[in-house]
Image (cartoon, rainbow, N blue to C red):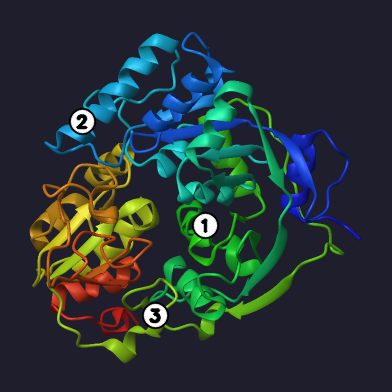
Amino acid sequence: MGQTITEKILAKSAGKTSVKPGENIWLNVDVLMTHDVCGPPTIDIWKKEFGADAKIWDKDKLVIFPDHYIFTANKHANRNVELLRKFAKEQDFKNYYDVRTDRYKGVCHIALAEEGFNVPGTVLFGTDSHTCTSGAFGMFATGVGNTDAAFILGTGKIWEKVPQSIKFTFTGKLPPYLTAKDLILTILGDIKTDGATYRAMEFDGEGIFSLNIDERMTLTNMAIEAGGINGIIPADDLTAEYVRVRTDKEFEIFRSDEDAGYFSKYRYNMNTIEPTVAKPHSPDNRDTVKNVEGVKLTKCYIGSCTGGKLTDFEYAAKILFGKEVNVPTFVVPASTQVAKDLEHTEYQGVTLKKIFEDAGCVIAQSSCAACLGGPDDTIGRAVDRDVVISTTNRNYPGRMGSKQSDVYLASALTVAASAVTGVITDPRNFIT
């Protein structure tokens, strides 16, 4: 029997010719990423286990992005950034992207791609569950806890079990009223939040390869919402072009063998999928937008590693152009590069930034912001009795702030349409 793309990449990392699901192997880590929430405790564990005078196993392979709780007056959050700054100075490594400097990049998962750390065929671990986003580049990427990260920090290795794979094949062409967010919410509704527990979610088919890089990242980003250890899309010419512009590292492209073994397989036709939402309080509480139309909203939110990429804002701008929002609507670019792109990318001769400003949106600084709640002064944060529709990835009670709020997850098209009307609205009312 042949091997899946995930098995091939893990075999390469382990120095083996092949591996099989269930096998435990030592992996040689290509990149370790952490941020302001998990970085300080990871460093504390590392110092305790490896000694106060320990050195990073490889300075070029550690990346730290403050991005979660940063634009806040909260002293505890600010203290975490100070600890990272001190660590970067002590260890004298270059891949620390400090906040409030010209090196600041924004949300780690998007910055990893923009800064050339996502390389096909490699292995990347991060102290964040949405590290699986990087799998859009034909690589193995997954989240780990602080203790495992501390071990990687000291040795460059990790003990990992090879996962089984589930294959999701998409045919057809994405209609103008759909986005990748609708696709992944459809999958979650089918397999639920435990349907891919410790399994690789592999996305393939003509429909997948017709998507741009931003949209592919949306799919792999939410693999963890089904319990997946990783999401992965085989690299193609589009991937290779994106990567080569951002790094001179050599890379190897892997693809699954035709006779590779899978735990299960699913097939979807993009032309038959409708605009989709996840109702409170779980990402798998799927429904069609049409079925929940009319739910009165108090906030709309377009941002996060899932829905704050340039493509997401291009989607939103098509609907918001020449219109005004009827509820507070927050636009939060996932990265500082995306924020810059909003100032130069145009729709109908008008920059996206101006379209959002003219529509009455609040444009915030690039960060995770309200996606995971955060301190009380976090912009866009949900408060008691808020009903929010958002492009983020989770809607558990309290995820975006108050436990007494309701959060609906949807595409940027659906959020923008809803912002105009003030109630949940099918984007097909604006786009045919």
Residue 307's place in the image compared with 296, above or below, is: above
> Which of the 4 quarters of the picture holds residue 92?
top left
Label whose residue precedes the other's in the sequence (1 or 3): 1
Secondary element at tag 3: loop
- How far apart are the alpha carbons under marks 1 and 2? 33 Å
Residue 159's place in the image compared with 302, above or below, is: above
Q: Is residue 273 left or right of residue 340?
A: right
- Nearest the viewer among 149 and 299 is 149
Tell me the quarter of the image containing the N terminus.
bottom right
Secondary element at tag 1: helix
Label whose residue precedes the other's in the sequence (2 or 3): 2
Q: Residue furthest bottom?
A: 291
Residue 429's place in the image compared with 9, above or below, is: below
Question: In the rendering, at what x and y percent does residue 302 appear?
Answer: 26, 60
**Amino acid under disc 2:** Asn
- How far apart are the alpha carbons under marks 2 and 3? 40 Å
Residue where numbered disc 2 is placed: 78
Q: Residue at x 36, y 63 (%)?
A: 394
Secondary element at tag 2: helix
- Nearest the viewer among 188 and 26 is 26
Residue 275 marker: 3
- Nearest the viewer among 51 and 363 is 51
Q: Residue furthest right?
A: 1
Q: Residue at x 43, y 67 (%)?
A: 181
Question: In the rendering, at what x and y percent does residue 286 appear?
Answer: 42, 81
Residue where numbered disc 1 is placed: 216
Q: Does any portion of residue 43 appear in the rendered image?
A: yes
